[in-house]
Image (cartoon, helix red, strand yellow):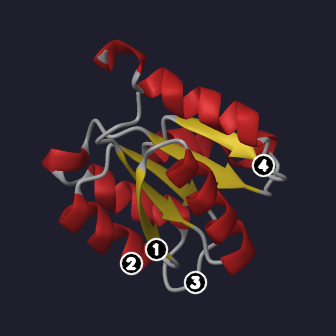
Amino acid sequence: MAFGKKVLIVEDYEDIRLSLCKLFELEGFDVVQAVDGRQAIEAAERERPDCILMDLSLPVMSGVEAVRKIRANAKLKSVPIVAVSAHDAQYYFRDVIESGCTSYLLKPIDYDALLAMVREFFSNDR
């Protein structure tokens, strides 16, 4: 199902980023990486991913601010963006959703739940 689908993984912690990359590569996704908010915007505009996984606590520019800037690009308005964060959703949920994120997943990451969420974004593409 993931054949030809591209996911942008934005995470500043290398171990987490690399494990997410491996997970999605094994599922057949093309993977693009970014380590900060500014790189996320540049990669999203250059690569046009089908889905973005966005950490919220990033150097250079926060994930929330990066999402706002990505959503300002008309070509990226409909790309699903999953906020992946260790921050308690109760305090950040409104800001995250208002910034343009499609959903929110709390760390530590439940990889099965994350894959199911991303697969659901593409379930109508068959």
Residue 1 shows up from this direction: yes
Numbered mark located on residue 39 in the image: 2
Q: Amino acid at mark 4?
A: Ile
Q: Amino acid at mark 3?
A: Pro
Q: What residue sits 25% from the left and 41% below the top?
A: 77
- The image quadrant of residue 122 is top left
First-in-chain label (4 vs 1): 1
Q: Are marks 1 and 2 in contact (CB under 8 Å)?
A: yes
Q: Are marks 4 and 2 in contact (CB under 8 Å)?
A: no
Image quadrant for the N terminus?
top left
Residue 13 shows up from this direction: no
Residue 11, percent from left and from top: 60, 69
- Foreground residue, 99 or 41? 41
**Dot 1 surroundings within 10 Å: few (below 14), some, or many (20 or more)?**
some
Numbered mark located on residue 65 in the image: none
Tag nearer the camera, 4 or 2: 4
Please give the residue where the numbered disc 3 appears in the rendered image.
59
Q: Is residue 114 left or right of residue 6?
A: right
Please give the residue where the numbered disc 4 appears in the rendered image.
109
Q: Amino acid at mark 2?
A: Gln
